[in-house]
Image (cartoon, rainbow, N blue to C red):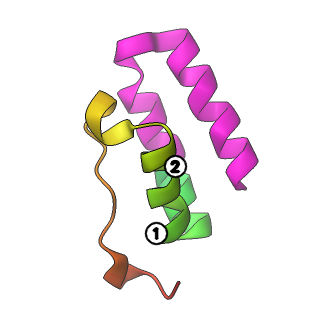
Amino acid sequence: MNLDDARTRIESAVTQYGQHAAPAIDLVMNEVRSDLGAGAFNELVAEFDLELLYNIAPMESDHSNS
């Protein structure tokens, strides 16, 4: 998984499910966290405003080396 793939998948989930996209986005975000780390995870949370819209909070930075 890379950031471009994650963005595409998040956008697709939002388009397909609208306000009910949280479970699909959560799956993508789990892959991002696993493959790319907390920095990438937090970048996507901020970029898509996931905390406000889907209650997906940024990760604590102490889990990452970045």
> Per the image, is 3 magenta?
yes
Q: Pointer 2 and pointer 1: residues touching (CB < 8 Å)?
A: no
> Which region of the structure is painted magenta?
1-28
Inspect this view and state whether residue 1 appears. Answer: no
Say few, some or many: other residues with alpha carbon within 10 Å of mark 2 (under 14 / 14 to 19 / 20 or more): some
Between 31 and 42, the one nearer to me in the picture? 42
Q: Which residue is mark 1?
A: 38
Name the residue located 47 percent from the left edge and 30 percent from the top edge: 24
Give coordinates of residue 41: x percent, y percent: 48, 58
Q: Amino acid at mark 1?
A: Ala
- Calculate the distance from the C-alpha at mark 2 to the C-alpha at mark 1: 10 Å
Q: Amino acid at mark 2?
A: Leu
Name the residue located 45 percent from the left edge and 82 percent from the top edge: 64
Which sits earlier in the primary sequence, circle 2 or circle 1?
1
Q: Main secondary structure of the magenta part?
A: helix
Give coordinates of residue 39: x percent, y percent: 50, 69
Name the residue located 47 percent from the left edge and 53 percent from the top edge: 30
Please, is residue 18 above or below residue 34 in the view? above
Q: Secondary structure at mark 1?
A: helix
Q: Which residue is mark 2?
A: 44
Give coordinates of residue 47: x percent, y percent: 51, 44
- Looking at the rendered image, the quarter that the N terminus falls into is bottom right
Say few, some or many: other residues with alpha carbon within 10 Å of mark 1 (under 14 / 14 to 19 / 20 or more): many
Inspect this view and state whether residue 56 appears. Answer: yes
Please, is residue 8 above or below residue 27 in the view? above
Name the residue located 63 percent from the left edge and 22 percent from the top edge: 12
Residue most toward the bottom?
65
Q: Secondary structure at mark 2?
A: helix
Please, is residue 46 above or below residue 40 in the view? above
The reply, left or right, for residue 35 in relation to residue 37 is: right
Give coordinates of residue 61: x percent, y percent: 35, 77
Res. 15 mark:
none
